[in-house]
Image (cartoon, rainbow, N blue to C red):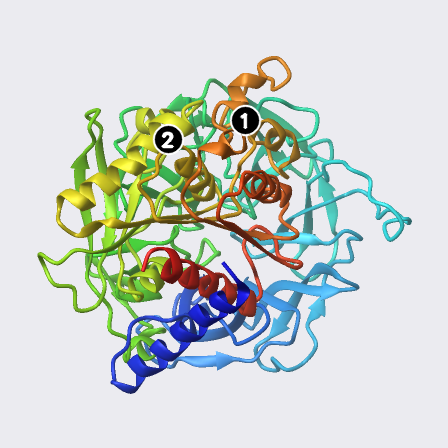
Amino acid sequence: MSWKNYSACLLALAFSSLAAAAAGLHPFTVEDWAKLHYANAVAVAPDAKTILYRVDHGAEKGPEEQEWHLILADGSGDRTLKVPEHFTPEGFTKDGAALYGQFEVSKQPQLALLFLASPDAKPQVLTSIPSGVTHAILSPDGARFALLANPAPVDPLEEVHTVVEDAPTSVYVIGADGKNGAWWCPALRQVQATAWSQDSSSLALVSQTQMIGYHYVRSFIDVCSASGNHHIADIPNAAISELPNGAGGIAWSSDGKELDFLSTTTDVLTPDHVWSVSAAGGQPVDRTPTLKGSAMEIDGNAQGHTWVLVARGVRNEVDSFSNGKLTPAYDWPGGSIRETPVAPELSASPETLAFSVGDPTHTTNVAVVSGAALKKITSDGDSELSSVDLGEVKTVHWTSAEGIALEGIATFPAGYEAGKKYPFLVLPHGGPEANDNLDFDSFSRLISGLGYVVLQPEYRGSTGYGSEFLDAIYQHFGDRAYRDVDSATDYAIAQGWADPSRLAIFGWSAGGFMTSWTVTQTHRYKAAVEGAGITDWLSFIWTSDIQQIDYDARWPESDPDAFLRFSAVMHASNVTTPLLILHGADDKRVPTFQGREYFLALAAHGKTVRMVTYPGSPHFPKLWEQRADVFHEIAAWLAKYNP
């Protein structure tokens, strides 16, 4: 296709958006997406009356923007907090007079205090660790902070060369006044998660093998204090998420006798059950062996309660964990809770819980406990969506041809008419050990805004359906998971939603793999878009920035055929579907050459293919002008090849 024709498609889409806007309510557009506000609970003040929350929103150009707000727990008194540039608030100090957080000093984040009486003043910096710090947690007595940081000195030649090695992470503890800072248990150099004991004397730690030098994952639990380290247990699997921030991930029981954490027995190395071990040491025990869902996060608060975010299908709820039992506690009707609740960090404080919740017609907002339920106290995003015509979203269930019970989220275009067939797009999620949440999904809304019915299938390997379902993807991404995704299209056709002559597929990351692979296996789709997808498993295993053996732990050189089997680049000659490839030019998770290799193979075979990269972009673009272009490229491709 010529660039002239492609540009014409882009212009036509732009003019159609303007015409729809002039009529009043309009379908969700990329311009709406950039303006949309999302509110997330960050911290609760020691008096349990004030909540700190963050508002995220896009822009015409540049990275995502953030605003900081303080609001009373009853929903009144909302005020914007102007904070200095490069300061990121994380919580309140003991007296509630200041916020602590990270402040950039010489390009490195350091722990600093911002006094609420003079928020425009420069933050008071408490640390000067050469490589900077990550998330801080305040001790329950308010006397000390624990931080994760790299104890190694800065390489004096860092502007000349880069030494390829895993950065060590250890625990640094400092007084709340910025004095008496010291490394605790410095021999521990792979720490990923921390939790203070109720008496503030010690820290429970989770460490995990890093990437370089390991072809397996092991985890370790220790209790660390100023006087030394007590090793508690070895875990023969993962016990943290892949992108920890040092907060949560392990919790003390209310009596201090046990440590609770997440781990798994699956080959996909994705923690999905709640485990406990004696704080004195011993054998860990899976407390939820029959869980019909997935434990996604765990966090204990200073008031002695342990909360677990549990995915049950496409909805997340918060359960309490006590005496070895998981009990449902809070959910968000018609939607999903995004993460475990925040609460005051002092043991002497009353317990006020603040949640981040969302649903398909409202962006994420802050909610608090009201009786036995949750009540929203913010309404960010509502004004931006007031002029948008949103179609129906619903969860659907079907059984595939091979007898697998599956769930998905269907999003319909505004004005959908039952009995009428629509262009259809199947949207497999990334991860792949993840799931789609029943909340406001921008990509589904953008594509349904083009007049499509969109279906997000929870294929085997998704969280939320138990360990057996999760583990079924191991070494089977290209057959079991593929068949589940394709069965979603069968289901949409059978329901009468999808026009079988106007089918499309789009996914990012693991969903990008699914797209690149699908078009080698079937010719039913008229247009396909893959973003940052894996196309060559043999090279991917050793070139991603994190361990990827959750897909397949075999050694590539010992069994290359096992990895080439599901590599789309090895089947490029089979492709007939026009394919658009989108990729960040600085993607470390799925290196950009994965897309380029496939692009060149398809082009050499004379296939209809286009590749667009985004300068400086990681795994998904951070700059909003690039995010907008992603959607414009998708929309133009669908308009051209699946009109």
User: Would residue 480 be found to the left or right of residue 169 on screen?
Assistant: left
Q: Nearer the viewer, residue 209 or 642?
A: 642
Q: Is residue 482 above or below residue 557?
A: below
Pair 2/1: label in front: 1
Residue drawn where x is 46% and y is 75% of the image: 69
Packing grade of label 2 (10 A; few <14, some 14-19, many >=20) is many
Kindly indicate the quadrant of the structure image that contains residue 178. bottom right
User: Would residue 17 be found to the left or right of residue 92 on screen?
Assistant: left
Going from N to C along the chain, the mark reached first, 2 or 1, is 2
Residue drawn where x is 45% and y is 27% of the image: 268
Residue drawn where x is 18% and y is 45% of the image: 493
User: Would residue 162 be found to the left or right of residue 450 on screen?
Assistant: right
Q: Nearer the viewer, residue 621 or 292?
A: 621
Q: Is residue 305 above or below residue 185?
A: below
- In space, the residues marked 2 and 1 are separated at their CA atoms by 20 Å
Which kind of residue does numbered mark 2 sit on?
His
Residue 195 x %, y %: 53, 43
Q: Residue furthest bottom?
A: 22
Kindly indicate the quadrant of the structure image that contains residue 192. top right
Packing grade of label 1 (10 A; few <14, some 14-19, many >=20) is some
Question: Does residue 255 appear in the picture of this structure?
Answer: no
Residue 578 x %, y %: 43, 48
Disc 1 target residue: 549
User: Would residue 415 be found to the left or right of residue 86 on screen?
Assistant: left
Kindly indicate the quadrant of the structure image that contains residue 639. bottom left
Which kind of residue does numbered mark 1 sit on?
Ile
Disc 2 target residue: 273
Residue 190 x %, y %: 66, 34
Residue drawn where x is 53% and y is 42% of the image: 606
